Image (cartoon, grey):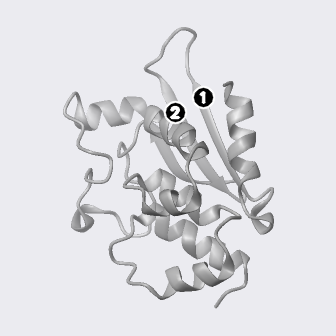
Amino acid sequence: MKWSKLKKTIEDKFADCLKDRVHIYTTRYTTGSYFMVRSWITIDKEEIANFSTPENSSKYGWNTPDIDKRIEPEERTEGQAVEKGEFSGYDFTDACFEYLNLNIDAALESENPIIRSFAMLDRRLGKRRLKLLRDQDSSDLHPLVFRMLNFRLQCEKIN
């Protein structure tokens, strides 16, 4: 599937209140290079998450930990949804493809924070369930998932 179709399919799953506010992007720098890949997420045209393959490679090399165990909570920068080099562009596109085939329950339970963040934006996630997620302990949520949950709560006007 081409990126343009994948992007449209993912963004079409977002709740109506998020239309034209949240966008996903990916690019490859230099022709023929499969290493120079960068993906990102924007909210209201502001980049909130960067998924860079070169930065990920320089941080982890060949010993990249599991996607849900890359950075310890005490090592995180406050207010940042994704740490520099935490995810690669390939992590992002793989998550996009995987997300297409998941029901909302599986997406919410995924170990992959990128998939879980998409689930927070998904129109299949109703307001009642959003309220339940809001009331749960958020200390175990990845910062990207937490940011998307709060943004969705704000857009849905759920206090």
Residue situated furthest left in the rendering: 63
Residue with the mark numbered 1: 27
Would residue 57 be seen by someone viewing this image from the given angle? yes
Which residue is depicted at the point 43% across and 38% down?
A: 91
Sequence order check, earlier mark of 2 and 1:
1
Considering the image in quadrants, where does the C terminus appear? bottom right
Near mark 1 (Cα within 10 A), the count class, few <14, some 14-19 or many ≥20, is few
Q: Is residue 5 left or right of residue 132?
A: right
Residue 72 or residue 68, whichever sits in front: 68
Instruction: Please name the amino acid that badge 1 sits on.
Output: Thr
Label at residue 157: none
Up the image or down, 158 lies above or below 52; here it is below
Which residue is depicted at the point 64% across and 79% down?
A: 153
Looking at the rendering, which quadrant does residue 52 occupy?
A: top left
Which residue is depicted at the point 49% across and 57% down?
A: 106
Residue with the mark numbered 2: 38
Position of residue 77 measured from the top left corner of the image (x, y, whole percent): 34, 64
Near mark 2 (Cα within 10 A), the count class, few <14, some 14-19 or many ≥20, is many
Residue 103 or residue 36, whichever sits in front: 103
Instruction: Please name the amino acid that badge 2 sits on.
Output: Arg
Up the image or down, 145 lies above or below 130; here it is above
Q: Are marks 2 and 1 in contact (CB under 8 Å)?
A: yes
Label 1 secondary element: strand
Position of residue 100 measured from the top left corner of the image (x, y, whole percent): 61, 43
Looking at the rendering, which quadrant does residue 122 occupy?
A: bottom right
Up the image or down, 43 lies above or below 155; here it is above
